[in-house]
Amino acid sequence: MLKVLVAEICSEITVVNAFGNLNSENPKLLGQGTFPTTVQEGDISLGVKQAMADLEKEIGPWGSITDMPFYAVYPIQFEGLNSKGIASNYFNEGILPASEAMMIAVQLIYEEVGDVLVLKLEEESITVYSVTSNSLPLVESHSTNRNKHIKTKPETSEEIALRAELTAEALKAAVKSYCELSIHFRWIVGTGSSLTELPNGLQILTESVKGIESQGETAILLDRDCLMTSLGALTANYRQGAWQLLRESMGVEN
């Protein structure tokens, strides 16, 4: 089985996703490894290697990493990625900004389904991506104040409830301008671990987009495995596998 790796280097957490059989009719998410991003240490590769070690605990040894396609995506504030400890040849399939990889995934949905709105919720911001037949692709970023009130990883029921409340407020504010538009979105998708890790993430998303969904025409979906960015990086070389895994992450039947 050909294994393919994608490292998502986020501001707080580094995630390494492992995929298999991407060129077959049965592509798989093999596992996910995580570790805090080590930008403060001046060497992001430390976090990547630890995330890979965490992944190996889940899926077992994989042999030589040089034999596997390895992609990376990173936040725009990490433009100096190479100077922070990762040589350009560390990732043999290249490095993409996370926003570019996300838009590739959004464009893939549009080409397969139709008009789409995607909300990516991160710790300090919500980024809204939309692709429709009546306008150019659009990316809008909205800052949030959630970090002033909640932990990165809420633990108690009270902390989780507070996070859910503030998340709903932030989502409603981010989509407010879309309520005035006459766009019949086929899919509205929520992604980002800040949303997907909430036990009622889909319910929060559904309630937050009331007024912009078309009753009976719009599917409101949650990227439960938080794969959109990674799959966007893979789309150019593994389009069909990426599309199938994206649908599975959202609970959409083939």
Image: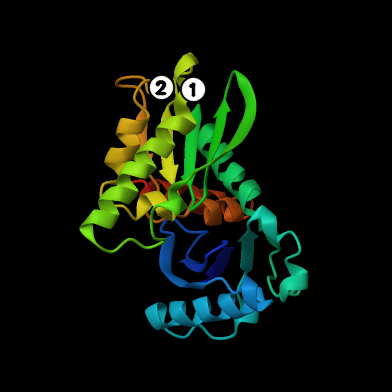
Helix, strand or loop for disc 1: helix
The image's mark for residue 123 is none
Q: Position of residue 174 (x, y in %)?
A: 48, 33
Q: Amino acid at mark 2?
A: Ile
- Circles 2, 1 touching at the beta carbon (< 8 Å): yes
Point out the tag, 2 or 1, that comes first from the N-terminus.
1
Q: Position of residue 87 (x, y in %)?
A: 75, 75
Vertical side of 218 occupied by 165: above or below: below
> Could one spot residue 253 in this view of the protein?
no
The image's mark for residue 212 is 2
> Could one spot residue 216 in this view of the protein?
yes
Looking at the image, which residue is at 40% across and 78% down? 59
When asked about the image quadrant of residue 57, the answer is bottom left
Check the image and tell me how it is coloured. rainbow
Q: Nearer the viewer, residue 162 or 224?
A: 162
Q: Amino acid at mark 1?
A: Tyr
In this view, which residue lies farthest toward the left? 157
Helix, strand or loop for disc 2: loop
Vertical side of 179 occupied by 70: above or below: below
Looking at the image, which residue is at 38% across and 49% down? 195
When asked about the image quadrant of residue 81, the answer is bottom right
Label 1 sits on residue: 178
Vertical side of 33 occupied by 157: above or below: above
Looking at the image, which residue is at 63% across and 73% down? 40
Quadrant location, the C terminus: top left
Q: Position of residue 190 (x, y in %)?
A: 42, 42
Q: Is residue 126 left or right of residue 167?
A: right
